[in-house]
Image (cartoon, grey):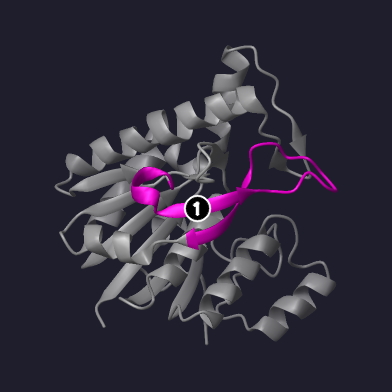
Amino acid sequence: MKPITIIKVGGKIVEQPDTLNQLLNDFARIPGDKLLVHGGGRSATQMATRLGIETKMIDGRRVTDSEMLQVVTMVYGGLVNKNIVAQLQSRGINALGLTGADMNVIQSHRRPANPIDFGFVGDVDKVDGNQLNNIISQGIVPVMAPLTHDRQGSLLNTNADTIAGEVAKALTPYYDVTLIYCFEKAGVLADENDDNSVIPHITHEDFLRLKDEGVIQGGMIPKLQNSFDAIEQGVTQVIITKADAIGSDAGTKITK
């Protein structure tokens, strides 16, 4: 099968002109088929503040009420997404910005309000890998915003790491899939204060042990859970690395 590289990049990278510039240069150089999934949380928070809308977080996760849904739709689906698309066009990459509602590529359901009501937040039910394959096979590069829909007319704010993992799984019937989570750290670290303490390869047993020991914590836990789930569902490899290390051998690798 043909290889495809799926890059998920966090908001911190895409929201700074210099780091975004380097990321898109590196992304443009990736050979063959590719797809980009982006975040944008800090931009959404800044826009909400400018509009006088309070940002509510619970355990580091955004509560998306009806006003905040309007903000994240504007920022994720508009400002951040279209800026990336325009920048990729300038690099000769024929990019297409998508939310999950476009071409019905990602359906979700609203997360139950019990025990915590996160509002208009979606948990993914289905990704249409065939539709994405049709787009990619025409030489088009999808750029996916962290928004999905419920088929009842409502958009839903959806975790970008989860979108990347679910898209990767949906494309395994068509491609040999490599999923790369890139952010500001060099990989999964044995010591979170030491960027040189990258764990080069991690097994599921390692993950459970390091989680119990408190070495792996916070946002890295769902990132790794998504990674192992993707591997179990047929993704060839997952790499967690620094944004400026795409295309190198750096970072933490997860394989079957």
Residue 39 in the image, given as x and y percentages of width and height: 50, 44
User: In this rendering, does residue 218 appear at all?
Assistant: yes
Residue 49 within the segment the image draws in magenta = no
Compared to 165, does 61 lie above or below? above
Q: Quadrant of residue 225?
A: bottom right
- Residue type highlighted by circle 1: Gln
For the point 79% across and 45% down, the residue is 59
Q: How many marks?
A: 1
Compared to 58, does 199 lie above or below? below
Residue 127 in the image, given as x and y percentages of width and height: 45, 61
Residue 102 within the segment the image draws in magenta = yes
Task: Please state which of residues 65 and 30 is positioned toward the viewer in this rendering.
Answer: 65
Residue, disc 1: 107
Q: Quadrant of residue 87?
A: top left
Q: Can you say which quadrant of the picture contains the N terminus?
A: bottom left
Residue 244 in the image, given as x and y percentages of width and height: 40, 55
User: In this rendering, does residue 246 appear at all?
Assistant: no
For the point 24% across and 44% down, the residue is 88
Near mark 1 (Cα within 10 A), the count class, few <14, some 14-19 or many ≥20, is many
